[in-house]
Amino acid sequence: MISLSLIGIGTGNPEHVTLAAVRALNEADLILLPRKGEAKSDLIDLRRLLCRDLLEASSRTRVVEFDLPCRDARADYLGAVDDWHDAIAEVWADLMATHLPEGGRVGMLIWGDPSLYDSSLRIAERLGDKGQALEIRVEPGITSLQALTAAHCIPLNALAEPVLITTGRRLRERGWPSDAESVAVMLDSGGAFQALPQEGLTVWWGAYLGMDKQCLIDGPLVDVAATILERRAALRERHGWIMDVYLLRRM
Ligand SMILES: C[S@@+](CC[C@H](N)C(=O)[O-])C[C@H]1O[C@@H](n2cnc3c(N)ncnc32)[C@H](O)[C@@H]1O
C-alpha cells in the first residue's frame, strides 16, 4: 500500500510552509522532487532547501529527484496534457516500485496548493488505475492568489460579489466572462488582458510572489498594461522564467 501525501508548500516563501506540511514531510519514507529543466531550476532549488531545512536529523526520509517528462507542444492542448499526465503517472509508479517495493509513505511537494490549477491529484488517480493500492492525502498550502492579495493588501472579492478564476488562454479565447466583477488570471503566457476592452478595469499584478524577486504593479489597466508587459518581458529575460498572476476588477 502506498500512502501518497500531496503537500502544499506555498509559492516561493519558505516561511509560508505550514506546520502540518512539515509533519507530513518528516513522516514520509520517500520524497519525490521533480526537475523541470535548467530554466526553472529555482523551483527545484526551493524544494531542495525545504527538504534540507525542514527534515529533522532523526527523520529516515529519502529524497529522490527525477526528470519530469515534457509536454508535447502539439495543437490538441487537452490531448497533449492527457498524454503528459499518463507519462508522469508512469514515472511516479516506477519510482515508487523501485524505492518502496513493500509500500510506504510518499511525499510530493506541490507548488501553492494541490487544488488550484495543479494536476497532481489527477495524476495520482491514474496510479490507482495501474492497480497500485493507494491512499491519497492532501496538506493545504498558500496559493498564488492568496500570496497576490496579501502582497497588495486587498480582498480577493468585492463586497458580497463572486470571483471567477481562469487562465490566460481562456481569457484570450473567450474575453471577459459575462456577469463577472472580479476575474483572477493564472497561467498566462503573457498579456492575455490585451484581448479585453481595458477601460473601467483595475489590475493587481504580481510575479515571483513570496520570493526575493517579487514584483508588484497595480492601477487602472489602461494606465499600467504597457508597464506590466515591459516589466514581465525584462524579468523573464533576466531570470530565464516567470510566474505571474493577476486580479482584474470592474470599478
Ligand atoms: C501550475 S499553476 C500552479 C498554481 C498553484 N497550485 C497555486 O496554488 O497557486 C502555475 C501558475 O500559478 C501562478 N503562480 C504560482 N506561483 C506563483 C508565484 N510565486 N508568483 C506569481 N504567480 C504564481 C501563475 O499564474 C502560474 O502560471
Image: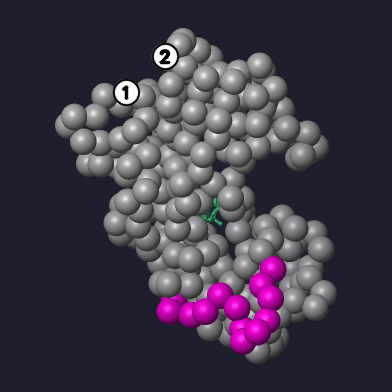
Q: Is residue 217 left or right of residue 214?
A: right
- Toward the viewer: 31 or 58? 58
Question: CB of mark 2 within 8 Å of CB of mark 1?
Answer: yes
Could you tell me which quadrant the C terminus lies in?
bottom right
Q: Vertically, is 49 above or below 196? A: above
Q: Is residue 156 left or right of residue 160?
A: left
Mark 1 lies on a secondary structure that is strand
Judge whether residue 110 can be spotted in this image.
no
Q: Is residue 51 left or right of residue 32?
A: left
Q: Vertically, is 206 above or below 99? A: below
Q: Residue at x 69, y 68 (%)?
A: 164
The rendered magenta stretch, by its main secondary structure, is classed as loop
Q: Vertically, is 232 above or below 240? A: below
Precedes in sequence: disc 2 or disc 1: 1
Image coords of residue 23 (percent x, y) = 33, 42
Reply yes or no: does residue 232 show up in magenta: no
Q: Residue at x 62, y 68 (%)?
A: 184
Q: Residue furthest left?
A: 57
Image coords of residue 8 (percent x, y) = 45, 47
Q: Residue at x 55, y 35 (%)?
A: 136
| Quarter-of-image position of residue 185 | bottom right
Q: Which residues are magenta?
A: 152-164
* Numbered badge on residue 62: 1
Look at mark 2 in the image and give the residue it sits on: 99
